[in-house]
């Protein structure tokens, strides 16, 4: 469901990103295809330098449908940025992509925590975060980061995903599958 970023996916991704239901919530906004191509090339180079981790989300047939990224990596932690094209909203791709991405981050790339900064008015993203069994609202528990992302007024809610919580979730998923096979 995820793959490394490639310039060949840019045309389709750009068309999905400029949709008014998606564009306001994209961190790396591009106002033309050429700008999107340039930003993608910069992202690929930044990943090579260890500054960002970026993947293309794909559907069952390998078609690009969005991106999932870890930005601002510092001390084995970073901020999640993800978007899917509008035709793919509400179809389960978001959770599948996050599970795959978090598995790669935590078990292959030595990331220990992922933060999600979600605009308070972004109801779709907030509901998606609240559905993740391994995510916790961190406005109070990580006051330092919460205040850093909200220096003047409350614009964002902060969610945190820790490797330990994600691992516990993975174990529970495996136990549920094992119980189903036993029955």
Image: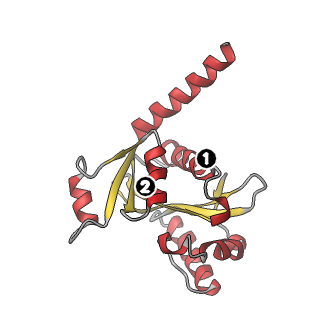
Which residue ends up furthest to the top in the rendered image? 183
**Residue at image location 44% in from the left, 65% down from the top:** 51
Which of the 4 image quadrants contains residue 72? Answer: bottom left
Whether pointer 1 and pointer 2 mark residues with C-beta atoms closer than 8 Å, the reply is no
Residue 115 is situated, as x and y percent measured from the top left of the image, at 38, 54
Q: Residue furthest right?
A: 61
Closer-to-camera residue (87/93):
87
Res 64 seen here? yes
Residue corresponding to mark 2:
126
Q: Position of residue 66 (x, y in %)?
A: 62, 64
| Snapshot quadrant of residue 10 | bottom right
Name the residue located 66 percent from the left edge and 13 percent from the top edge. 182
* Callout 2: SS: helix
Q: Eyeballing the image, is 183 above or below 85? A: above
Measure how far apart labels 1 and 2 are at the Cα level.
17 Å
Q: Is residue 143 left or right of residue 88?
A: left
Residue 30: percent from the left, percent from the top? 55, 81
Left or right, residue 64 beside residue 46: right
The image shows residue 140, relative to residue 154, as above or below, that is: above
Which image quadrant is residue 143 in? bottom left
SS at circle 1:
helix
Residue annotated with mark 1: 96
Give the residue drawn at x 56%, y 22%. 175
Task: Give the x, y percent position of residue 118.
Answer: 39, 61
| Residue toward you, 54 or 11 | 11
């Amino acid at each position: 469901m995820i793959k490394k970023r490639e310039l060949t996916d840019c045309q389709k991704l750009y068309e999905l990103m400029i949709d008014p239901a998606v564009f306001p919530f994209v961190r790396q906004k591009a106002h033309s295809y050429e700008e999107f191509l340039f930003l993608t090339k910069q992202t690929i180079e930044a990943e090579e330098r260890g500054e960002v981790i970026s993947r293309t989300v794909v559907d069952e047939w390998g078609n690009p449908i969005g991106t999932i990224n870890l930005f601002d990596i510092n001390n084995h932690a970073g901020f999640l940025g993800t978007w899917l094209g509008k035709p793919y909203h509400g179809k389960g791709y978001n959770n599948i992509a996050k599970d795959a991405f978090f598995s790669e981050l935590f078990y292959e790339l030595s990331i220990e925590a992922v933060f999600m900064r979600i605009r308070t008015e972004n109801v779709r993203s907030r509901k998606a975060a609240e559905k993740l069994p391994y995510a916790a609202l961190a406005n109070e528990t990580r006051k330092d980061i919460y205040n850093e992302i909200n220096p003047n007024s409350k614009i964002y809610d902060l969610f945190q995903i820790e490797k330990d919580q994600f691992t516990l979730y993975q174990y529970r998923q495996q136990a549920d599958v094992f119980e189903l096979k036993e029955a």
